[in-house]
Amino acid sequence: MTIVGVHGIGKYHYFEEAGRSPSGAAEVMRGKWNTYLHKGLGTGRSYSGEQYLAEIAYYAHHLRKGEPKPPKKMAPAEKMIFADWTKQLNGRFAAAAGESLTGIAHRMAEWLLGRLGEGAVRFAEDFCPEVATYLGGGDPRTKSRDAVADTIRRRKPTVVLAHSLGSVVTYEAFWAHKDLRTDLLITLGSPLGMRNVVFERLAPVPVSGRGARPPGVARWINVADKDDIAAIPPGLRPAFDGIERDISCNIDWLDFHTVRNYLGSGAVTDLVKTHLR
């Protein structure tokens, strides 16, 4: 039994720290994911090198060449992502007549800071540029998708754990590469259903307003924290056919999106226990 992880946003620094080595970055992350899963299992034993995951599919180096930019310095496409996303966080937002994208981004950054604190603003600095780059198409999207597909093809996992933007890359990888197979796909903190940001831009394009479980995925279960501002909406079944369950959890209202908290939660470990080596 084999488990593969697919990382989310904000992981470019592992590439730099590993001497610009994707495999080195993936191996460092695998070690961390193993410790997170071990804690979630609640064995009562300290982590001693248990190898729960075979590999982390690493793709962040395809999405940017340097460190993230703050919202005020976002490119127009990134500001559009930021504006559309935060409108869903706070439905009362409406652009004033003639207001620029920069003005909207500034107002919404202030709202995020006041409502959720600096952690949410830092999250936005990672989320918007990477999502905009990926959904912008071209080499970044194709290479990211192919990197994930290559890992799944080599490892032949029984379980794929896909976090954050990684759930979008994984969804598209399975659709683009029909030879890929897994028994169970678990999406964590997924923005797949986010309207006007992700959902309508997926490949393949949703038909009649609905996406679908990829043919190579036998089972799909979605897990989202109720306060995760990337998982909007938290439940994916209303927008995708073939999802077995939407599971809501409460990992941490301030640390609402980290894979550490998702893997450390009983909601995830209960699903993977039978698949652990």
Image (cartoon, rainbow, N blue to C red):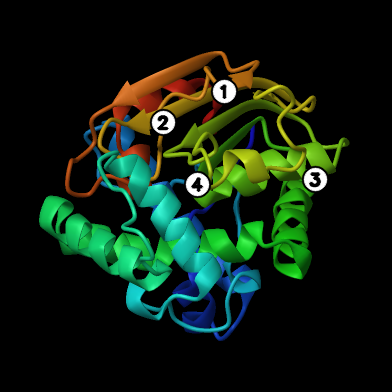
First-in-chain label (2 vs 4): 4
For the residues labelled 1 and 4, the Cα–Cα distance comes to 35 Å
**Residue 223, percent across and down?**
42, 28
- Foreground: disc 1 or disc 3: 1
Mark 2 or 4: the one toward you: 2
Find out whether the residues at labels 3 and 4 contact each other: C-beta distance under 8 Å: no
Measured in 3D between alpha carbons, the distance from the residue under mark 2 to the one under mark 4, in whole angstroms, is 33 Å
Residue named by callout 3: 153
Q: Of tags 2 and 3, which is closer to the observer?
A: 2
Q: Which residue is mark 2?
A: 233
Distance in Å between CA atoms under marks 2 and 3: 30 Å
Q: Residue furthest left?
A: 114
Q: Which residue is mark 4?
A: 51
Of the residues shown, which amino acid type is indicated by label 4?
Gln
> For residue 184, what is the image quadrant?
top right
Is any part of residue 59 visible from this angle? no
Residue placed at 53% from the left, 47% from the top? 197
Between marks 3 and 4 in the image, the one whose residue lies nearer the viewer: 3
Tell me the residue at 14%/58% (across/down). Answer: 117
Q: Are marks 2 and 1 in contact (CB under 8 Å)?
A: yes
Q: Is residue 170 above or below residue 274?
A: below
Task: Choose the circle earlier in sequence order: 1 or 3.
Answer: 3
User: Tag 1 or tag 2, which sits nearer the N-term?
Assistant: 2
Q: Secondary structure at mark 1?
A: loop
Label placed on residue 239: 1
Name the residue type under label 1.
Ala
Q: Position of residue 47 (x, y in %)?
A: 31, 48
Which residue lies at the image location 53% right of the left edge and 22% below the top edge?
221
Which is nearer the N-term, disc 1 or disc 4? 4
Residue 161 on image: x %, y %: 54, 39
Q: Quadrant of the N terminus?
A: top right
